[in-house]
Amino acid sequence: MKTMPSQTIHIIGGGLAGSEAAWQAARAGVPVVLHEMRPVRATAAHVSDGLAELVCSNSFRSDDTENNAVGLLHEEMRRCGSLIMRAADAHRVPAGGALAVDRQGFSAAVQRALVAEPLVELRREEITGLPPADWDSVIVATGPLTSAALAEAIRTFSGEDALAFFDAIAPIVYRETIDMAKAWLQSRYGKGDGADYINCALDKPQYEAFVAALVAGEKTEFHEWETDTPYFEGCLPIEVMAARGIDTLRYGPMKPVGLRDPRTGRGAHAVVQLRQDNALGTLYNIVGFQTKLKHAEQKRLFRMIPGLEQAEFARLGGLHRNTFLNSPRLLDGALRLKAMPRLRFAGQITGVEGYVESAAIGLLAGRFAAAERLGRDVALPPATTALGALLRHITAGADAGTFQPMNVNFGLFPPLPEGAITRGNRGERKPLLARRALADLAHWLGPARAAAE
Ligand SMILES: Cc1cc2nc3c(=O)[nH]c(=O)nc-3n(C[C@H](O)[C@H](O)[C@H](O)COP(=O)(O)OP(=O)(O)OC[C@H]3O[C@@H](n4cnc5c(N)ncnc54)[C@H](O)[C@@H]3O)c2cc1C
């Protein structure tokens, strides 16, 4: 076991946020103890004891820096020396314009880097209550599946009830069981290398029968503690979308635009897309098919899709609770609990949504905690950056009364100066926001980098 000096930062949770926070603090020269409860105690969704395990999709979403806010966040994190982004880039699998990773390779790379880092000590233990008083700098990054004992303690010491809602897992299919005589390889609009997705076409009668079956399908009963909690709109179960109207899925995860069925030479009425889920290319996930249908129903219904009649599933869909704080009310601008500033929060528990956003908030928490330890001012990233926009949203920008988890998006950014958008460059709004963000990030990193050296 490494001997850690005083001045140590304690980080609870070695997921996306905690791993990134540990890396950032250690790289700034501050010792860290990273407390991860797996494998001592499991969660409902993790299946390994690896750090930074991806519990559902293997996608970090769009990698388009100029036109997509999450792509911009990727780039900002890379420029901040992010371990999560370094590991993701190194373990990338084909996914059109998205950044998708081989999940085992990714998690192993994060763990290897942290174990090799002399200033990081990894302890496999569950923290079950208020951290000891002599831990005077703590980052809580225990995620949506924070263990019950700690969640209860947080509820008590934060003076606020944590909220809960559902995320949903999409099923994964073995590639060899997909009938490629019916399905075909193509990315929407030919993005990426043009053939990153497996597509299954449905004609109108097939689509309507499928929608009807989804609506009628047997669903999982909610646990008592899960009732009366709203869904996150960005991650609705497929059967909930189906119940909203016959065409809802055709305008959602089953949209046929940008795809042409080579057997007919035409677009289809609806298309189901499957995306590569591991480096070997043996597993594919059904994109957007998160569900709370019973497992037997999932097999029966998803085998109605042309090309998936013989599909075997490596993993079926499911539902999980999410735990998050009312951050706008409870946290200060540097992610500290106002009522107990030795505690910082990071990751999904702060009310951001998604792997990348969780890691981004971990990155900031690690930097802020390290700056404090080094006796430096905590400089917040400019609000014009994706990092700053997201941070400000959860700590100040969002309405505390209606606070719900948030993905990064350009709507969180301050508008461009008046006159920057003219009739001639209206389509340039996002690239202009992105360029401004990266320029402002460089200013923020400039003195911060100089100070760290
Ligand atoms: C079922 C499910 C599916 C999801 N799917 C996606 C998806 O497809 N795409 C996406 O972008 N986001 C998804 N999310 C949302 C979210 O982005 C991820 O959960 C992400 O992993 C959050 O990062 P985190 O670091 O905050 O938490 P985590 O990555 O979950 O890390 C928290 C860590 O803390 C540990 N821990 C918990 N309690 C304790 C304790 N008391 N003591 C010590 N350690 C503890 C856990 O074991 C875990 O390793 C999903 C969430 C859930 C619940």
Image (cartoon, rainbow, N blue to C red):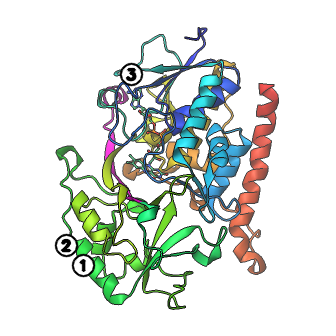
Q: Which residue is mark 2?
A: 216
Mark 1 is on which residue type? Ala
Q: Position of residue 53 (x, y in %)?
A: 48, 40
Q: Amino acid at mark 2?
A: Ala
Given residues 250 and 217, the one toward you in this image is 217
Q: Residues within 10 Å of mark 3 (few under 14, many from 20)?
A: some
The image quarter containing residue 62 is bottom right
Tell me, yes or no, whether the two marked residues, 3 and 2, touch with CB atoms within 8 Å.
no
Residue 255 on image: x %, y %:
46, 78
- Mark 3 close to ligand 1, CB under 8 Å: yes
**Discs 2, 1 touching: Cβ within 8 Å:** yes
Magenta region: 153-173
Q: CA distance from mark 3 to mark 1?
A: 46 Å
Let me know if residue 171 is in the magenta part: yes
Horizontal and vertical percent position of residue 265: 55, 91
The question of residue 140 being in magenta is answered with no
Residue linked to disc 3 = 127
